Image (cartoon, rainbow, N blue to C red):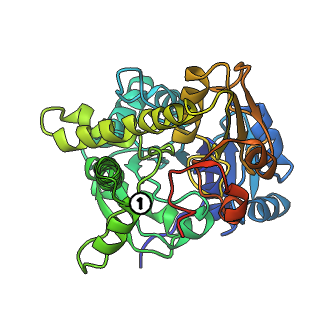
Amino acid sequence: MSEVFKGRLAILGLGYIGLPTAVAIATRGVDVVGVDINPAIVAAVSRGEVPFTEPDLAVAVSGAVAMGRLTATCELPEADAFIIAVPTPFNEDRSANLSYVKAAAEQIASRLKVGNIVVLESTSPPGTTEQVCRWISALRPDLRMPLDGENGADVYIAHCPERVLPGRIMIEIVTNDRVVGGLTPKCAEKAASIYRLFAQGEILLTDAASAEMAKLVENAYRDVNLAFANEISLVCETLHIDAWEVIRLANRHPRVNILNPGPGVGGHCIPVDPWFIVGAAPEQARLIRTAREVNDQRPHHVAGQVVEKAQRFRSPKIACLGLTFKANVDDVRESPAIEVVDLIAKSLPEVEVMVADPYVDKLPKELSGRDNLRLEGAHSAVEKADIVVLLVEHDPFKTIRHTRLGGKVVYDTRGAWRQ
């Protein structure tokens, strides 16, 4: 019978992945300590509250805290297993910034005991799990590491990347298959014992580098597909053809599944992860690099189209609907909508730009300080605007009647208002 983890678990990072993972494990009867460097997040979780919006998460956190299974702190406690779920952004040169992972590994090193398990969940370039092992080994020469050979290792280190969709995290964290890659087969098995607590999907055991690469490939695949859709949109725009209709018809082929174009590609994963592959093998990852460049350019094209349309008016007012990176969530990380709004406001400093988003209550820091930008309710913004730009297909936006758009220049980047 497969081993199931028993003991105390600490999760470093209480963000979009760390907190749902903590709850999923805590509600299975395991004592979980969530660790975060942000005191406000720790205080919120300690009260049983959620510091961001995600369906079903608030009830789960409240219940886990009330049961006494989930606690939060800024100080890393002793535990039997540690999960690293901290950010892995990229640097200016688009190489992976592993400073948060390194800091977490160094914290864990001071608490490690014989038999402990360390799992890296943060999306990382191939070789990062090995690097975590080396960072820990440098601080704990008294412990035998998996890289020293499988026989006699004192701790078990593995990688298990998250693969969930914001807005469905609490469903997919349980139902999706999980890839667990160990520095040794024993490491993979030990780490899998944690995910057997709550995962209903299949748990696939492999080596750490393959697990790291698999996650990057998943997001690069979607990025390439999105780049194809965005490029088709550009071609159709040039030829005065409806791209949405072309894609709809092409997708009736049984082996074709083109995604929908948009103002760019956002979120913490898809715009970032492909660059980790490019960084690992720059000469070989030519298609992946090109796809990233196509998608990175997309917000500039959209903003340019809006600026061009604004030239038709003497004193235009522009309404931009949506700031988050996808529909019906409050997550603005790497959002192309923010970049589009910023480019429009920067290019038209004398033009009033109204921004509406039902999930955002203040302008993101990237947009703060611009005198011609302000948040406004969607209906009010649409009513006042000469140009309406749909950047995110939030459900409330899709219900705006076409009669309210009459006489206005409408730029629907999502195809949500097509008849």
Q: Looking at the rendering, which quadrant does residue 206 occupy? A: bottom left
The x, y position of residue 20, in whole percent, is 63, 57
- Residue 200 to residue 402: above or below: below
The x, y position of residue 80, in whole percent, is 57, 50
88 to the left or right of 71: left
- Can you say which quadrant of the picture contains the N terminus? bottom left
Towards the viewer: 313 or 275: 313
Residue 115 visible to the viewer: yes
What residue do we see at 51% from left, 29% from top? 100
Q: Looking at this rendering, what residue extends furthest in the left direction?
A: 283
The x, y position of residue 223, in whole percent, is 34, 50
Residue type indicated by callout 1 = Asn
181 to the left or right of 47: left
What residue do we see at 74% from left, 19% from top? 371
Q: Looking at the rendering, which quadrant does residue 141 occupy? A: top left
Q: Looking at the rendering, which quadrant does residue 343 occupy? A: top right
- Residue 1 to residue 383: above or below: below
